[in-house]
Image (cartoon, rainbow, N blue to C red):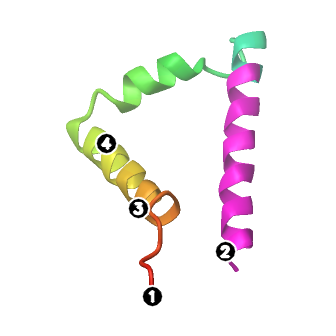
Amino acid sequence: MREVTIAGFLLCGAVMALLVLRSHRDPLRLAPFSALLDVVLADRAARFTILLFWWWLGWHFLASPPSP
């Protein structure tokens, strides 16, 4: 089950990278990532939510499990 979860996150990351590349190639159809971040990070609650999400992601995938 863990592999499925990791694969899902990797897929989301790949899709995000594809969207970033596509926005640079055709900026009229898709807003650039920097413009999106400017809008999203203007709100304090959104910045806090993103911070909590990254903390949760690191806690679950980067922290080592306790030794028996």
Can see residue 26? no
Q: Residue at x 44, y 62 (%)?
A: 63
Q: Which residue is drawn at 49% across and 57% down?
A: 62
Figure quadrant of the C terminus: bottom left
Q: Is mark 1 on a helix, strand or loop?
A: loop
**Badge 4 is on which residue?**
46
**Badge 2 is on which residue?**
2
N-term mark: 3 or 2? 2
- Return the mark for residue 36: none
Q: Which residue is drawn at 67% across and 62% down?
A: 6
Q: For the residue marked with disc 1, what is the amino acid?
A: Pro
Q: For the residue marked with disc 2, what is the amino acid?
A: Arg
Left or right of 56: which side holds 21? right
- In this view, the residue in front, 30 or 67, is 67
| C-alpha gap between disc 3 and disc 2 | 14 Å
**Badge 3 is on which residue?**
59
The nearer-to-camera label among 4 and 2 is: 2
Left or right of 56: which side holds 45? left
Q: Is residue 34 above or below residue 5?
A: above
| C-alpha gap between disc 1 and disc 4 | 38 Å
N-term mark: 1 or 2? 2
Q: Which residue is drawn at 40% across and 61% down?
A: 59
The image position of residue 55, as x and y in percent, is: 36, 53
Left or right of 46: which side holds 28? right
| C-alpha gap between disc 1 and disc 2 | 20 Å
The image position of residue 25, as x and y in percent, is: 78, 11
- In this view, the residue in front, 40 or 57, is 57
N-term mark: 1 or 3? 3
Looking at the image, the residue that sits furthest to the bottom is 68
Residues drawn in magenta:
1-21
